[in-house]
Image: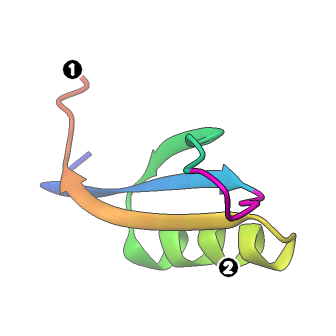
């Protein structure tokens, strides 16, 4: 991957408001546009989701 950064998407699940929940899924995509689309899809399904920019992993 030529990019020096990636975007880690975390999908949490439904939050009952009583306690913090752990990420049910966490994975990386190569563009912010993809990350935003993944988060929007999860939220449309009623899940809590977010993304953040992270350094790219060396996958040689």
**Residue at (76% x, 60% y) in the render:** 16
Place of residue 30 in the rendered image (x, y in percent of width and height, measured from the top left): 38, 58
Q: Which residue is mark 2?
A: 40
Up the image or down, 16 lies above or below 32; here it is above
> How many residues crowd mark 1 within 10 Å: few (<14), some (14–19), many (20+)?
few
Which mark is in front, 1 or 2? 2
User: Which quadrant holds the N terminus?
Assistant: top left
Place of residue 24 in the rendered image (x, y in percent of width and height, measured from the top left): 65, 39
Q: Quadrant of residue 39?
A: bottom right
Place of residue 21 in the rendered image (x, y in percent of width and height, measured from the top left): 60, 46
Q: Which residue is mark 1?
A: 60
Up the image or down, 12 lies above or below 50; here it is above
Specify start and end residues of the magenta stretch as a single range.
14-19
User: What secondary structure is marked by label 2?
Assistant: helix
2 in magenta: no
**Residue at (87% x, 70% y) in the render:** 45
């Amino acid at each position: 991957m030529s990019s020096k950064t990636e975007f880690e998407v975390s999908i949490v699940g439904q939050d009952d408001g009583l306690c913090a929940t752990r990420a049910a899924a966490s994975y990386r995509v190569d563009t912010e546009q993809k990350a935003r689309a993944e988060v929007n899809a999860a939220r449309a399904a009623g899940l809590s989701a977010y993304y953040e920019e992270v350094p790219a992993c060396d996958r040689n």
